[in-house]
Image (cartoon, grey):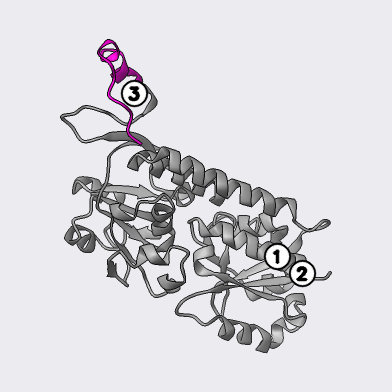
Amino acid sequence: MRRPRPTAAAVLVLPLLLTACGARTEDPGAADTTTVERCGEEVEYRTPGRAVVYEAGSADKLLALGLTDAIRGYVMPPANPPVEESPWADEYAELDLLSQDLLNRELVVDAGADLVVAGWQSGFSDERGITPEILDGLGIQSFVHSETCYNYPGHPARFTPFEGLYTDLDRLGRVFGVEDRAETVVAELRERVEAVRAEAPDGEPVRVFLYDSGTDQPFTSGNQAPPQEIIEIAGGRNIYSELEGRWTTVSWESVIEADPEVILILDYGDQPAQAKIDFLKGSPALSEVTAVREDNFHLLDYNEAISGPRIVDGAESVASYLRSVGR
């Protein structure tokens, strides 16, 4: 959203006010800029027009804000379900698929990106040589999902996944100059989440295990990833809610001891959910786990479990299932 040109009387005062509040600059001789936090660090952004987005969560945030024309293209590894299944399928059809591999520096440079949107250790990576600091040195802006900032080197910041989502939409709205649209989208998402909370089952929360993958040891969500809050909002309790971290490996013994009443199966594009259910049901060690014995499995779409607007869909879906489970 661009502000009207100031009147002559206000010219001397207004620049100071805009700088103080981190608002968009209006110098006719310079690109529009605004200052927002990136993982606890104040960063000045120029208005982007060639954004590269990693995975559907990043793309969805921009698409929800009506920014299709500002996206240069998207990077979508095979784990992501087909974009044709997205609520923004029509918008995806207008965009270029730049790669089905992991995010890398060469891809971003070749695309002529002026902004990269991804998560820390979920797109951005020291090991692969693509970090906000490296991109800063190349003159390419970067935006890091707030939810992933809790262990960002030098500038950690902690957000619950849903507050991280709202924060990202607000900040992206400011970066792209669509603050009003961001405010509307966030208000709508908050309203949906509060409606889910209001309908949560009474009594002791249902014990829930999120099964991502793994046979020797299960891979699951700790208390810093979206499934933690999805389960809580829906009226359940993540059996690993005390486990500090985002996504991590645990033991089958600890799953058995916690005795989950419901198992959420993370539904990947390249890992059939039914194969995961068959493995769990076929394991003698898990045969007395309540969720396995009572066949209480529910699919959670991959894009409902990563930072993006669809985590609200995930909360609605899980809540509906938990209400259907008799105790």
Q: Mark 1 and mark 2: span between their CA atoms?
A: 7 Å
Residue in front for this viewpoint, 192 or 258: 192
Disc with the residue nearer the chain's start (3 vs 1): 3
Q: Residue at 64% across / 65% down in the picture?
A: 317
Q: Are marks 1 and 2 in contact (CB under 8 Å)?
A: yes
Q: Which residue is mark 3?
A: 18
Task: State left or right for residue 69 relative to residue 40.
Answer: left
Disc with the residue nearer the chain's start (3 vs 2): 3
Q: Which residue is mark 2?
A: 324
Q: Residue at 32% across / 68% down in the picture?
A: 102
Q: Position of residue 161 (x, y in %)?
A: 54, 51
Q: Which element type, helix, strand or loop, lies under badge 1?
A: helix
Q: Mark 3 and mark 1: span between their CA atoms?
A: 46 Å
Local packing at callout 2 (Cα closer than 10 Å; few below 14, some 14-19, many 20+) is few
Q: Position of residue 101 (x, y in %)?
A: 31, 71
Q: Which residues are magenta?
A: 1-18
Q: Which residue is mark 1?
A: 320
Q: Is residue 23 visible?
A: yes
Mark 2: which amino acid? Ser
Residue in front for this viewpoint, 202 or 185: 185
Q: Position of residue 308 (x, y in %)?
A: 48, 56
Local packing at callout 3 (Cα closer than 10 Å; few below 14, some 14-19, many 20+) is some
